[in-house]
Amino acid sequence: MIQKVTPLAILATNQMKKKKQFVSVAIYLRGDELSPDHVSKLLGVQPSRCQKKGEFKLGSTRFIAKIGVWTLGARSNSRSISELVEELFQKIGNPPVRLDGIEGVEDAYLDIFVPLSQRGKMDETLEFALTKSQIAKLGQLGLSACFTVT
């Protein structure tokens, strides 16, 4: 029997059994010449995390950043991936340029991270979907997608 997955059915199977599943979703902009201040000013939103090449990494006085990074993220133990993606899209709004077209950006992507192995089990099933409008919005923003399930 084929089970229909609704657009908001971005849930790990264990969530359907009422267990909580941590998920993290983030927009990453990366580049050697990326200026986090320029990106924030252009987009009108402050990042969750950022670093500039050649400066100390966030929270470190020992490690120097090898690349510039601007990140806008959302995470949850109870909300679906689709809801988190929608939250990021609302925060980013309609920027004046595609994110992959911002000066200094060499790589622009949406990262979806689900750590299934946090309980030592790898026999769980992850089932998720993005809506058609979310997939279209990724293209409009110039973002590729990266999925990590460990």
Image: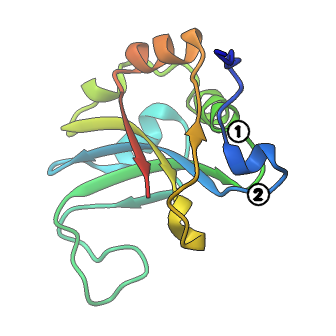
Q: Residue at x 26, y 24 (%)?
A: 101
Element marked by disc 2: loop
Name the residue furthest bottom. Answer: 62
Q: Position of residue 127 (x, y in %)?
A: 59, 35
The CA span between labels 2 and 1 is 11 Å
Q: Residue at x 32, y 89 (%)?
A: 61
Q: Is residue 1 above or below residue 42?
A: above
Relative to residue 121, is residue 13 drawn left or right? right
Q: Nearer the viewer, residue 86 or 122?
A: 122
Q: Which residue is mark 1?
A: 80
Q: Which residue is mark 2?
A: 20
| Residue kind at label 2, given as amino acid type | Lys
From the image, state whether disc 2 or disc 1 is nearer to you.
2
| Residue kind at label 1, given as amino acid type | Ser
Q: Position of residue 31 (x, y in %)?
A: 20, 47
Give the quadrant of the N terminus.
top right
Q: Residues within 10 Å of mark 1 (few under 14, many from 20)?
A: many
Q: Nearer the viewer, residue 150 or 105?
A: 150
Q: Residues within 10 Å of mark 2 (few under 14, many from 20)?
A: some
